[in-house]
Image (cartoon, rainbow, N blue to C red):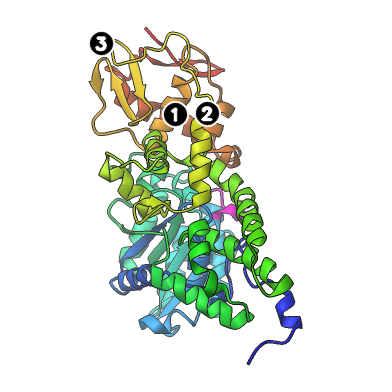
């Protein structure tokens, strides 16, 4: 039965907020299968995906009755709790307090145990009273915890401890791998080897088809008829598919058809809508070797490094060996045409026997004529690039945070966290980290990279 005229007035496609209604959640079948299998085996999962990849929507869906019974989970056996550190969880005490409130709300019998200022001991007692049920703790934006030195190593020992003693499972969401988020040395951390990683990239072709057919049936609009056009604009990344579908629906409901002019307008509007996200991707997320790979693909050339191509494919930015969106391909070409940043005065243009040199195309770093192996971590590389682009000049806290962590983290990154990252970088590029020659501290003002 076709919906009435009034039902067609509302555009059913949305992309600005997480999906809460399980009826609006589509795809991610492989990821869901992996997550629930891991939870069955008492394993924890790290969900990794860039912003707008649907991480929060996935966590919300895990808590629903639409998802759990499908994979053999029952509320008689498990309690799913969701925490969002963005809402003011700044240290272990606040973490325990939020967890206690959520437990008390979901399991009223736990409320008497969790009173006053909640301690780790009280959390353990509540988890014991929860038996035979087990806690599945979903922590969104987990980098705000794992990357915050206000959460000491003992806190992560506690998390690991209750995962063993009380079989607590964790499902966390971050934009980067946990090893790139942790404020300390990851391989020596209590959470090392605890998590199975699940990447959020593109939908499968079958998931895209299911989405288009199902939403077409619900809305009474023939979105599936424009599949190839939507695919060229949004690829199979859910966020961009929703943008494309929303634009096509707006155009279709005007005359119940899509004209050639409509297609031109949609292409332009999509590029305008997506540009801020492409800007952030290009300037804040992609490494130089990833940028170079996209430039090569935009020109129809092959990418010489298979590992870079694989990473871009996992993230969804490359689909079937091509840039996922025609709009992104055009954006990449426009960035290539912009004037490139010139290295600071005094920076050598190729590796030499003395000093630091960064190959922007490959992302390799050379120190005193020798290449850094293994490569720097993502955060270490971003810090070095910040100093490198301002060689022999002081970089203060604000510039470092803006470059390394992005501006939204300004209030969450303190001096000690920056100092810790500087220390890690020195361990990689200085012959004697305790007496640095290149990455030096300018007390009270910041850091700078000294060139020979």
Label 2, residues with CA under 10 Å away: few <14, some 14-19, many ≥20: many
Label 1, residues with CA under 10 Å away: few <14, some 14-19, many ≥20: many
Query: For residue 296, which quarter of the picture?
Result: top left
Residue where numbered disc 1 is placed: 383
The residue positioned 32% from the left and 20% from the top of the image is 433
> Disc 2 on helix, strand or loop?
helix
> Disc 1 on helix, strand or loop?
helix
**Would residue 138 be found to the left or right of residue 105 on screen?**
left
**Would residue 7 be found to the left or right of residue 230 on screen?**
right
The residue positioned 49% from the left and 73% from the top of the image is 26
User: Magenta segment, which residues?
Assistant: 85-90
Q: Is residue 86 magenta?
A: yes
The residue positioned 46% from the left and 46% from the top of the image is 151
Q: Earlier in the sequence, mark 2 or mark 1?
A: 1
Residue where numbered disc 2 is placed: 400
Query: For residue 135, which quarter of the picture?
Result: bottom left
**Alpha carbon of mark 3 to alpha carbon of mark 1: how far?**
22 Å
**Do labels 2 and 1 touch, CB within 8 Å?**
yes
Residue where numbered disc 3 is placed: 353
Report the front residue among 92 and 337: 337
**Alpha carbon of mark 2 to alpha carbon of mark 1: how far?**
7 Å
The residue positioned 48% from the left and 62% from the top of the image is 231
Report the front residue among 55 and 128: 55
Establish if 159 lies above or below 309: below
**Do labels 3 and 1 touch, CB within 8 Å?**
no
**Would residue 346 be found to the left or right of residue 219 on screen?**
left
> Disc 3 on helix, strand or loop?
loop
* Residue 424 position within the rendered picture, expressed as x and y whole percent measured from the top left: 36, 30
């Amino acid at each position: 039965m076709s919906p009435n005229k009034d039902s067609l007035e509302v555009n059913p496609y949305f992309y600005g907020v997480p999906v809460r209604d399980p009826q609006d959640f589509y795809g991610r079948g492989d990821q869901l299968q992996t997550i629930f299998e891991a939870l069955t085996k008492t394993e924890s999962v790290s969900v990794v995906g860039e912003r707008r990849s649907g991480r929060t929507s996935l966590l919300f869906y895990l808590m629903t009755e639409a998802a759990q019974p499908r994979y053999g989970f029952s509320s008689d056996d498990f309690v799913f709790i969701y925490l969002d550190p963005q809402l003011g969880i700044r240290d272990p005490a606040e973490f325990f307090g939020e967890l206690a409130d959520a437990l008390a709300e979901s399991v009223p019998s736990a409320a008497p145990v969790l009173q006053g200022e909640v301690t780790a001991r009280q959390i353990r007692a509540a988890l014991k009273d929860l038996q035979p049920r087990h806690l599945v703790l979903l922590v969104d934006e987990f980098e705000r915890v794992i990357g915050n030195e206000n959460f000491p190593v003992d806190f992560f020992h506690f998390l690991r401890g209750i995962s063993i003693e009380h079989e607590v499972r964790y499902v966390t969401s971050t934009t980067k791998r946990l090893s790139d988020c942790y404020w300390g040395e990851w391989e020596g951390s209590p959470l090392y080897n605890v998590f199975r990683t699940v990447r959020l990239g593109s939908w499968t072709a079958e998931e895209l088809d299911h989405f288009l057919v199902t939403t077409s049936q619900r809305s009474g609009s023939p979105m599936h008829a424009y599949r190839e056009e939507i695919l060229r604009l949004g690829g199979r990344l859910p966020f961009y598919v929703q943008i494309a579908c929303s634009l096509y629906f707006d155009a279709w409901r005007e005359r119940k058809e899509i004209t050639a002019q409509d297609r031109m307008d949609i292409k332009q509007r999509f590029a305008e809508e997506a540009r801020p996200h492409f800007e952030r991707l290009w300037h804040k997320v992609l490494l130089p070797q990833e940028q170079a790979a996209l430039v090569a693909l935009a020109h129809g050339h092959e990418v010489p490094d298979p590992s870079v191509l694989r990473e871009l494919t996992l993230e969804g930015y490359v689909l079937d060996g091509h840039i996922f969106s025609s709009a992104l391909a055009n954006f990449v070409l426009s960035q290539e045409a912009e004037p490139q940043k010139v290295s600071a005065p005094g920076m050598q243009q190729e590796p030499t026997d003395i000093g630091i040199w960064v190959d922007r195309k490959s992302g390799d770093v050379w120190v005193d004529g020798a290449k850094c192996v293994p490569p720097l971590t993502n955060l270490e590389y971003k810090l070095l690039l910040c100093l490198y682009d301002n060689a022999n000049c002081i970089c203060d806290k604000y510039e470092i945070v803006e470059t390394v962590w992005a501006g939204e983290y300004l209030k969450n990154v303190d001096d000690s966290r920056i100092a810790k990252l500087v220390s890690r970088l020195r361990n990689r590029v200085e012959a004697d980290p305790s007496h640095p020659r290149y990455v030096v501290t300018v007390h009270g003002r910041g850091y700078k990279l000294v060139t020979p």
